[in-house]
Structure formats: C-alpha cells, structure tokens
Image (cartoon, rainbow, N blue to C red):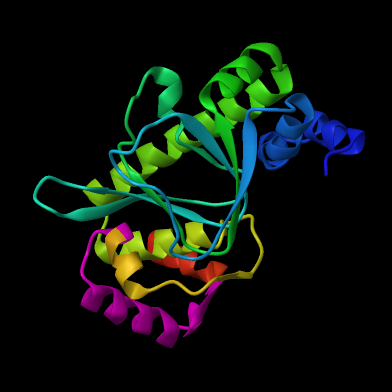
Amino acid sequence: MFDSRSLKTAEDGGASERQRYGARVFLAMANTGHSELSCKPNQVIFRQGDESDAVFFIDRGKVQLSVVSEDGKKRVIAMLDDGAFFGEGCLAGQAQQVASAIAISNTVLIRIEKDTMACLLREQPIFSEIFVAFLLSRNVQIEDDLIDQLCNSSEKRLARTLLLLANLDENGTAEATIPKISQELLAERVGTTRSRINFFMNKFRKMGLIEYDGEIRVRSSLLKIITPN
C-alpha cells in the first residue's frame, strides 16, 4: 500500500523511478474511480473496437498491444511492462480502442476511469509529471520502432526487441531473463516469419548472446548485433 515515503521517492527520483511509483501515487490521490485487475498470461484486457473509457497502468507484468488490419493481418505495435500506461486515447476523445491489449505474463493493472484520470492530471502535479514523462518516453520509442522497421534487417529488429524486453542497454546489467514468450509472438512484433525468428534465435544462442530454453536469458553482448562497430 501507499505511504508517505513512497510519495517522497516519487518526488525525488528520476523519471523512470517516478513512473514506477505512479500507481501508488494515484491510489494516494483518489479514493474512487479506479480498480485493480489481475490478469493471467494471454488474458484479453480489451479488444480493438471496444469502448475506450479508461486509462490502464501496469503495476506489475507485461502487456502486448496489437492491431488487425482490414485484410486480417495482425501486427504487434508495443510490448509494455511495469510503470507503463495504455488506453490513454480516451483522454483525446477516442471513442473506441484502436488496438487490442493482452497480458503476456501474470499482470496486475490499475484501471483508471477517464473522468478520474482527467481530474488527477489537472489537480495533481506529481501524477501529471509521471504521465507526461511516460508519454514522451513512449513517443521516442515509437520513433525508434519506425526507424527500426524502415531501415533495419529482421535480425537487428529481433535483437533490439529482445534487448527491450529484457530492459538491457549499454549501461545496464550483464544479462536479464525474459519470461517465456513464443516465437510466433516475437515474429508478430518483429514483422517477419516464425522460421526467420527460429533461425536467428539459434544463431544468437550459438554466438553465446542468449540462452534459450523456455525462458530467454539475454546478454548485453547482444548489443553488438545492433551496433557491430
């Protein structure tokens, strides 16, 4: 549960730390207009076309956002983890969800009703900072994803996806583990076929960049696939 020390940490920490404390800050500021949801892997949170009337915050876990085109092609547009918001389109007048949201691990969410979220953004500076910091960070991520799709090979896109899922970068830890994730899901995220994902996963394993046995242990040395020089 929230306490004053958590709020102090949120005020004094960096953007990512404040974002992680966002759910607790919210619970301290609003007694109504929110609810906690526990989701199992592969549980649908909402579907593309459903009513858009709330913002969601990931307290723990991972969520996949995907879209299906008119000709039935499915594409994963984002994989979000702890501290992320989604469904915020309702604040800009979006009546229907433009994507589907599915939990890809055991996940705890906070569902924040549209009116309550708008009120918090107006009245609570700390919460507003957390939310704006997330939106700016995700905007950079979207730009990077677009460049990745337009300019990089499927091998580099897979390496980048694995590093993002493991939260590894050049300043990060030596390795991290990604919970079990199917090659089909990775193929949807990368924008290629399952056979290509299988080929590159085996290649990365032989190079000692990952360990792959159900769970995926990613080493920071995988960065050399993206930046070989």
Q: With 134 as the anchor, is 31 left or right in this view?
A: right
Seen at 79% across and 30% down, the residue is 28
Q: Quadrant of residue 190?
A: bottom left
How many numbered tags mark residues here? 0
In the image, residue 119 lies at what x, y percent?
A: 62, 15
In the image, residue 86 lies at what x, y percent?
A: 48, 38
Seen at 28% across and 66% down, the residue is 187
Q: With 209 as the anchor, is 69 left or right in this view?
A: left
Residue 145 visible somewhere in the drawing: yes
In the image, residue 226 lies at what x, y percent?
A: 40, 60
In the image, residue 121 lies at what x, y percent?
A: 62, 18
Residue 229 visible somewhere in the drawing: no
Decide: is 97 above or below 119. below
Residue furthest front as drawn:
32
Decide: is 188 above or below 132. below
Q: Is residue 199 magenta?
A: yes
Return the residue nearer the eye: 26 or 53. Answer: 53
Q: With 81 as the anchor, is 6 left or right in this view?
A: right
Highlighted magenta segment, given as a residue range: 189-218
